[in-house]
Image (tube, grey):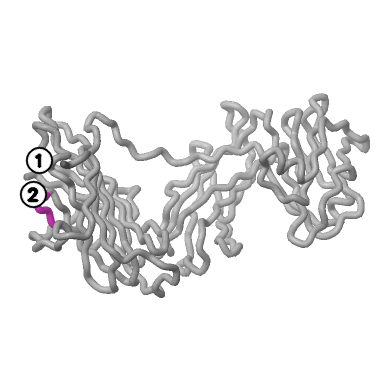
Amino acid sequence: MKTIFSLLLLSANLGTPALAAEVPLLPAGDTDQVATRVVSRPAPVTPVEHAPVRFSWALDPTDDLRQPEPFVVESREYWETVDAAELERGVAVSTSAPGAIIRVSPTRAGAAIDVGALRVTRGGRTVSLARRNDGAQLRAAGMQVNERAAAVQLADTAPAGRYRLQMPNASGQYVVHVYEPRSTVRLFAALGSDRVLASGTSTIVVNLSDGDQRLQGLKAGGLLVAPSGESWPIRLRPGRDGLLRGKVPVPANADREPGLWEVQVFAGNGDVQRDARTALAVAQPTARLAGGYSFDAARLQFALPMAVGSRGRYEARGTLYATAPGGALRPVSIAHSADWLAPGRDHLLLDFDRDHLPAGYGAPFELRDLELNDQSRMAPIERRARAARVDR
């Protein structure tokens, strides 16, 4: 008995059929990620499954599948790195609302912060604090912070403005982090794409506003930071709409360290400062879709030719849209396929179960939301919103 979820493991059903005539994929859209080359990389050193697998499951065609909106980072905080001499003299702290929280964290070799030694002044006078917490108390409250850190919070009677943070007998370097939970001044930052291929480019859009009012006179910049800690500057420029925009070019040798890359942005107008961070997945094009496909109407199967540059396990996934009785294209099934492939020419097969077609649904079909991933290196290589259309 078949179920909504049809799992096709390696068996006679996974035999490779004779491929039909190949036709080109649809032209890539502006937001698609498409590899134009392949690179050779060493085989993964960690154990990776080699057995092929293909499966699909049915969708409710009345569901409205949409691509997620770009993730927008919102920040009411900023941070800066200072040395011991600066902290002893007094670090300037700018606030835009009462109740600011100031956290001080030593860098690698720094000693634990004595929270009782932290002093906040304004105009040379000590400012009253609502609370003081050492690192153990912060961690007990669920904060993922350095256990040697400490934090103080300004009292509600402390108005917005400039303060100085001091600590005697400082040694080494420190990160001073200022968070304003009650402030209406927020920094927004969004990447044009959170995935990019090595030597490719993403974009970032930045806005600093107080409520609904965009702040003027901004000075802003950014950094692209690799998992290794190496960084590259990002130049932000104002557009006619007042938003700040910048290109985020990724170097070609972007796979020296595993992990997500970080995009940091900094913006302020002299009275208020905000910083934000967001993540970027960077992949080497270890394989790519070769630019065509073939379709077996009897099997509801797409064959996707590939150019493989590096030995590894690759996965394709996509969504089948079928034409409903009223003529609209609706999603009916999702299929995944994965296999261990060697360098050269090869292919992956996406099998959609005919039982997933509701009564009255049929051609034309479209293959949408097509992705190619390097599972052995946890790398997203290609993504196409509309990949293929089959009229019959």
* Quadrant holding the C terminus: top left
Residue located 30% across and 58% down the image: 315
Q: Is residue 95 left or right of residue 289?
A: right
**Residue 304 image offset from top left, x and y in percent:** 20, 59
Query: Residue tagged by mark 1?
Result: 363
- Mark count: 2
Q: Is residue 333 magenta?
A: no
Disc 2 is placed on an element classified as loop
**Residue 102 image offset from top left, x and y in percent:** 76, 40
Q: Nearer the viewer, residue 96 or 228?
A: 228
Q: Is residue 385 visible?
A: yes
Residue 165 to residue 376: above or below: above
Q: Is residue 50 left or right of residue 169?
A: left
Residue located 14% across and 43% down the image: 365
Q: Nearer the viewer, residue 187 or 66?
A: 66
Task: Say the numbered circle drawn on residue 297.
Answer: 2
What is the magenta range? Answer: 294-299
